Amino acid sequence: MASRRKCEELILNGQVQVNGETVTTLGTKADPAVDVITVNGKTIGAEKKIYIMLNKPKGVITSASDPQGRKIVTDYLKGISERLYPVGRLDYDTEGLLLLTNDGDFAHLLTHPKHHVPKTYLATVKGVPHGTELDKLKQGIMLEDGMTSPAEVEYYDVDPEGKQSVISITIHEGRNRQVRRMFEAIQHPVTKLKRISFGDVYLDNLKRGIYRHLSKEEVEGLFKQARNAGKPRKH
């Protein structure tokens, strides 16, 4: 209907009714599935939950708005009227799979640190890291903000001349620029980074700058994976 602040103004000004009664107390509970909520006499309904996957291009801001006028991910959501927000972030120079939704519970569950939903990237790096260097990433490596969790790392493609290589890396955290900083820590800086999966949802052949809706099975699978990842492991 409006921003949170604007909605609070509507409530305080007596413009909102629940089941025919004017409500002016902020924080009053109402369930749009069973209660009739009106604003200035106009009935509003629960917003349809939208879950989409975008193949984010490089050079695009992961944000719903940008005061500097740079290109943002929502610029690519043609035909969608709902206000969607990114689930986590991909930095400006990183491309690939980005989830967007208007379901706050879904976004919170997937990005909460305790849930550790795996995310896989293809990192093009300078040179060819030795196996012992990749082992450091597999075991967890110390960064300026602490030790990383163990990552799953393997060679994906290697330049015959040894100038660069592509490494597949799966992490279970969401720190800022984490993959880039991990490879910097072993002296093989990233020149190109692409996320190819989030949980059990894969980018596959989705073209750059194009989005698609997640299937019901994919959404339920992500919910289940996040909840299971958040449970303490049995020993």
Image (cartoon, rainbow, N blue to C red):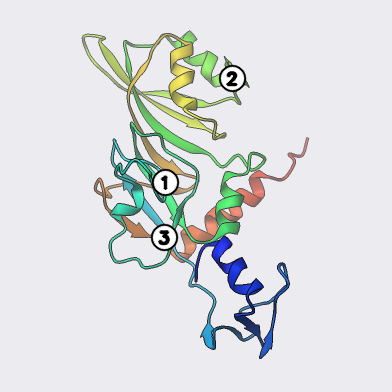
Secondary structure, mark 2, is loop
Q: Amino acid at mark 2?
A: Gly
> Is 76 drawn above or below residue 58 in the view shown?
below
What residue is rendered at 41% in x and 60% in y?
214
Callout 2 crowding tier (Cα within 10 Å): few <14, some 14–19, many ≥20? some
Q: Residue 10, image x and y in percent?
A: 59, 73
Kind of residue sitting beneath label 1: Ser
Which residue is denoted by mark 1 in the rendering? 63
* Secondary structure category for the residue under label 1: loop
Q: Are marks 3 and 2 in contact (CB under 8 Å)?
A: no
Q: Is residue 208 left or right of residue 179?
A: left
Which of the numbered marks, if any, corresponds to residue 214? Answer: 3
Mark 1 and mark 3 in contact? Answer it, CB < 8 Å.
no
The three-letter amino acid code for the residue at tag 3 is Leu
Q: Is residue 33 visible?
A: no
Which of the pair 142/88 is nearer the observer?
88
> Residue 123: horizontal and vertical position, in percent?
36, 26
Is 49 in front, or is 10? 10
Q: Residue at x 40, y 58 (%)?
A: 52
The reply, left or right, for residue 214 in relation to residue 4 is left
Q: Quadrant of the C terminus?
A: top right
CA neighbours of label 3 inside 10 A, class few (<14), some (14 to 19), many (20+): some
Whole-percent x, y for residue 189 in the image: 37, 15
Numbered label attached to residue 140: 2
Q: Residue at x 75, y 41 (%)?
A: 232
In the image, farthest residue toward the right: 235
Count numbered badges in the picture: 3
Which quarter of the figure has residue 223? bottom right
